[in-house]
Amino acid sequence: MSEKKMTSSRRHHLKSLVLQVAQTWLEKEKKERAEAKEAYMAENCPPSDTSGDQATLMELCKKIHAAIDKIDEERYDIEAKVQKADKEIEELKIKVVDLVGVKKPALKKVRMSADAMLKALLGSKHTVNMDLRANLKQVKKEVKEEPAEAVGDWRKNIEDKADRKKMFESS
C-alpha cells in the first residue's frame, strides 16, 4: 500500500514540476512577444510630433492618410492573390480526385436471412415474414372434361379442315 501512495505522490510531484516549467515558458514567450511588438512599432511607426501649429498637424494627417491608403492597397492586392491561390488549390484538389477516383471500400459478405435483412432495413416496428405463400388465396382447379367424341373422331376433323383449305384456295 505504501508503494502505491509513493508512486502516486511522486507522479503528482512530477506533474506539478512539469506545469511549473510550462508556466515559466509561457511567461517567457509573452515577454518576447511584447518586446518584438515594441521593436516593430519603434521601427515602423516613429513617435509623432504633435506639437506645432495647425498647418504642420494637417500635413502630418495627410502623410498618415497616404500611408493608410498605400497599406490598404497592398492588403487588397495580397487578399486577391490569396483568394486566387485558394481557388487554384481547390481546382487542383478536384482534378486530383477526378484522376485518382474515389476508392470504394471492399464490402464484406454478411450472412443474413431475408427476414433479418428486412427487419434491419424497416426497423423493429415492422414484422415481415418472407413466407409469401401464406398470403396467397387457395384456388381449386377445375378439371375440364372434353367430350369423348371429339377425341375418337380425329379423321373427321382432318376432313373438315381439308374442306376449309379448299374454300380458301378457291377464292
Image: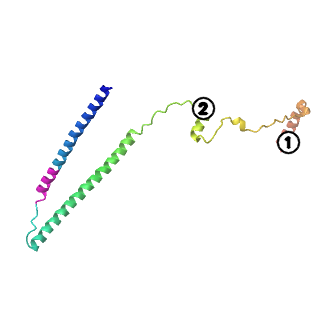
Expressed as whole percent of the image width and height from the top left, the position of residue 104 reads: 45, 36
Expressed as whole percent of the image width and height from the top left, the position of residue 159 reads: 88, 34
User: In the image, what residue type sits under mark 1?
Assistant: Met
At 59% from the left edge and 34% from the top edge, which residue is drawn?
116
User: In the image, what residue type sits under mark 2?
Assistant: Ser
Taking 42 as reference, is 56 above or below it? below
Residue 167 tag number = 1
> Does residue 73 appear to the left or right of 88 in the view shown?
left
Q: Which span is picked out in magenta?
A: 34-46
Expressed as whole percent of the image width and height from the top left, the position of residue 86 reads: 30, 50
At 31% from the left edge and 47% from the top edge, which residue is drawn?
89
Give whichever of 85, 33 is nearer the camera: 33
The residue beneath circle 2 is 113
Q: Quadrant of residue 115?
A: top right
Q: Look at the image and say whether residue 124 sits in the magenta stretch.
A: no
Q: Quadrant of the C terminus?
A: top right
Specify few, some or many for label 1: CA neighbours under 10 Å numbering under 14, 14-19, or 20 or more. few
